[in-house]
Amino acid sequence: MKPSNLTGRYIISIDVGGTKIASALVSLEEGAAEHVHIVKTGARGGEYVLRQLYDIIARYLFLLGKDEVVGIGIDLPGIIDSSKGVAIYVPNIKGWSNFLLKDSLLSFLRNDMNIELPVLLLDDRVSVALGELWRGCAQGARNIVAVIVGTGVGAGIIIDGKPYLGSSWVSGALGWIALEKDPVSTEKGWLEEEISGSAIVRKVINACLKNGGCDNLKFISSNNLSDVTADQVFQAHDLGDPTIIQVLTSVARIMGIAIANIVSLLNPEVVVINGGVGIALMDRYGKEIERVVNIVAQPYATKRVVLCRSRLGYLANILGNAVPFRDPALMHYLSIL
């Protein structure tokens, strides 16, 4: 029986990550994500993860009814050719290199579900930016950058209301930005090695071993620093560990410099910070990050830019996947590039 609260037109939206797959039904009219479902991404990758997608799609089609679904939007972490529906490079999922994902999904829909539906694949950076533009703190803007800091570091770029994808679908690789004066001669300096979740854990552990202390982190991790997570680092920070506070203050300043470079280069109206680590840093060091941006960025560019913390989180991806289905011109733009 179809739930009474599900009416109107919906898309099935799926956010595929290296560790989890989040999905929902998204109302194209109301911009609401309903029946959110989260599962772990199969470590075996390949066909196993593909079958996870089949199961998710089938579940929503049976839940809602085929006549209410107008399409399927899926975002992935990597290099995605939306026009061909190819996952060119998805490093966190085994076997998904030059993977004809769209063709596989269309075949499943046609042969197993007896339905024809449009399927759109997006780079997860693009979906975050579109979601923030539609329902997040970037509403009403035309030029925005969504900075995503989590396991990795990336940016979704919207220029004049359309995603900027570059010449080969890899724009927004913010984690590759060099910081050292001579980056060729050192393995350090890439932004992802400075502010990502794994970078923060590495820096904190090194500081704890060098300076001592970090009793709160040792307690939270059951004295097993080798398995510390970024979440645990932030928990220990909030208990007042001075070593961790020092490390995260430095990380926040580096993040501010990176955002300042974006502001100076692109002169956006809004820079929104998303990703688990990015949101955690904004919650604790938002004022410091903004202070650094105002000092470092081009002065005229800083006058108009708004720096905001995402209030959507991973739902930005879920909602962003629906945006092209609401805008035929945008769907056409993504389909012919």
Image: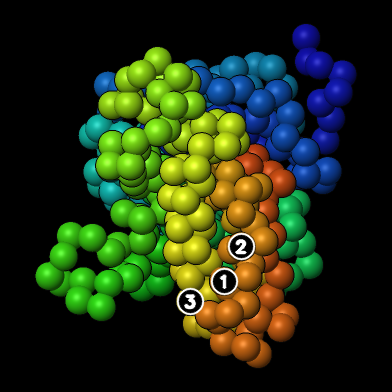
Looking at the rendering, which quadrant does residue 129 occupy? bottom right
Instruction: Evaluate if marks 1 and 2 touch, with contact meaning CB atoms under 8 Å apart.
Output: yes
Residue type at mark 2: give it: Glu
Counting from the top left corner in percent of width and height, residue 110 is at 48, 29
Q: Mark 3 points at which residue?
A: 261
What residue do we see at 61% from left, 22% from top? Answer: 37
Q: Name the foreground residue: 102 vs 166.
A: 166
Residue furthest to the left in view is 185
Q: What residue type is labelled 3?
A: Asn
Q: Residue at x 45, y 64 (%)?
A: 254
Q: Mark 2 points at which residue?
A: 288
Q: Label 1, secondary structure: give it.
A: helix
Looking at the image, tell me whether mark 3 or mark 2 is earlier in sequence order: 3
* Of residues 27 and 252, the one drawn nearer to the viewer in this rendering: 252
> Does 217 sit above or below residue 267?
above
Task: Characterize the local packing of mark 3: few (<14), some (14-19) or many (20 or more) Cα atoms within 10 angstroms.
Answer: some
Residue 154 shows in the view: yes
Relative to 136, 245 lies left or right = left
Residue closest to the far bottom: 300
Secondary structure found at label 2: helix
Q: Can the viewer see residue 130?
A: no
Q: Residues within 10 Å of mark 2 (few under 14, many from 20)?
A: some
Task: Depth check: give the residue in front, 62 or 94.
Answer: 94
Residue at mark 1: 292
Between the residue at mark 3 and the residue at mark 2, the CA separation in whole angstroms equals: 16 Å
Position of the C terminus by quadrant: bottom left
> Which circle, 3 or 1, is nearer the viewer?
1
